[in-house]
Image: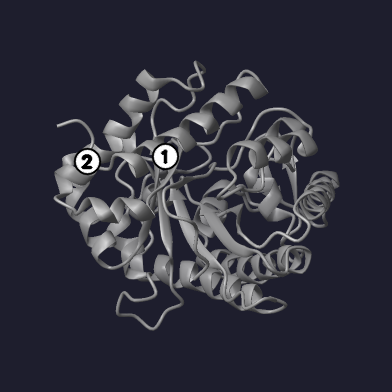
Amino acid sequence: MARWPDFCATGIGSMPGASIRESVQLVLDELVDLPHLPELPARGPGADMVGRALGLLPDFPADWGPTGWALADRPGHDTRQANAWLGEDLDVVEELLEGWTGPFKVQMCGPWTLAASVELRSGRKVLADAGARRDLVQAYADGLGAHVGDVRRRLPAAQLLVQLDEPALGYVLDGEVPTPSGLTRIAAIDQEVVLRALASATGAVQAAGVAGAVGGVGEAGTGVHCCGGSPPLHLLGQLHANGGTARPGLDFASVDLAVLTPRDDDSVGEALEAGLALMLGVPAAQAPGDRSGSAQVDRLAATVRGLWRRLGLPTDQLARVVVTPSCGLAGADSPAQVRAALSACAAVARQIRDDPQGPA
């Protein structure tokens, strides 16, 4: 898998504003060990995570309508705009990261959140139609692989990480995705079906990550970001490369530390035991303040150490934890607030490196 340095920080994806150049430069300033491709949903439909993913699926033409994204007879303006923005974003990344040999993370809406978000022409969600769902999963894997291949061509020596954003995954598994009317819920999707779709996506990422790599760089790493409560870490742990299955492996899970409770301890421990790496969102990282902020950094570092103590894990394993904001930063008031949040995450990672045990 693609690796990252010990004790590092990264972003989740979304940021405010409309300038990709300024956003990429801010990321490179603050997240020197593990930068990521910013997403700028404020630009409009097509810059949001669902629209960006739909732009990769030529067999699923869609457009933005009164109720959100819906399939259409032909690609509309909004999906064409999604492709144009993504191309522009990658042009800037290729320029500013020329010769980059370190890790670099890109994000894409995952297949299950996509299926739960997009409507068929009939008005039903794709998630509710087994045939449409199956076709979407296949088209998604093909489109994601093509996207990763494009990133690989632009950054041939980078260690690529691909984050699948799945905020709806828990709702899909629990049968809690509402129908468009809101009066009923779509039936829960079987875990094995969910696993096969995610494995298809990770397989596409790995194949595209290997193709065109130079300098001894191998396959791209893949992870899933779940910002909702009770993230299905036990399920994601089954997709880890060394988890005892023949499926293509998942390498990391990204979760909001604030939503983890003692009820989740077993699933967190099982996922870590299976070898799944963790990206942990610290809950107050969005708050602006003193960038050197000892009080804020102390508090955030204590939440990470607290989880480790609760699980009874050795502190040397903290080296592989990546610190992130608890979710995307699109709602931040200003670039200064984003800079403060990302700086705080990096400072938390450094403090854990320097003092993994914390105060007695």
> What x and y, as percent, mark residue 186?
42, 50
Say few, some or many: other residues with alpha carbon within 10 Å of mark 2 (under 14 / 14 to 19 / 20 or more): some
Query: SS class of the residue under badge 2?
Result: loop
> What x and y, as percent, mark residue 26?
68, 34
Q: Which residue is mark 2?
A: 357
Q: Closer to the camera, 336 or 194?
A: 336
Vertical position of residue 323 compared to residue 1: above or below = above
Q: What count of labels does the image hold?
A: 2
Question: Looking at the picture, which amino acid does disc 2 mark?
Answer: Gln
Query: SS class of the residue under badge 1?
Result: helix
Residue depicted at x 50% and y 66%: 130
> What x and y, as percent, mark residue 225?
46, 50
Q: Closer to the camera, 37 or 200?
A: 37
Q: Are marks 1 and 2 in contact (CB under 8 Å)?
A: no
* Quarter of the view holding residue 158: bottom right
Say few, some or many: other residues with alpha carbon within 10 Å of mark 1 (under 14 / 14 to 19 / 20 or more): some
> What x and y, as percent, mark residue 251?
43, 65
Q: Which residue is mark 1?
A: 350
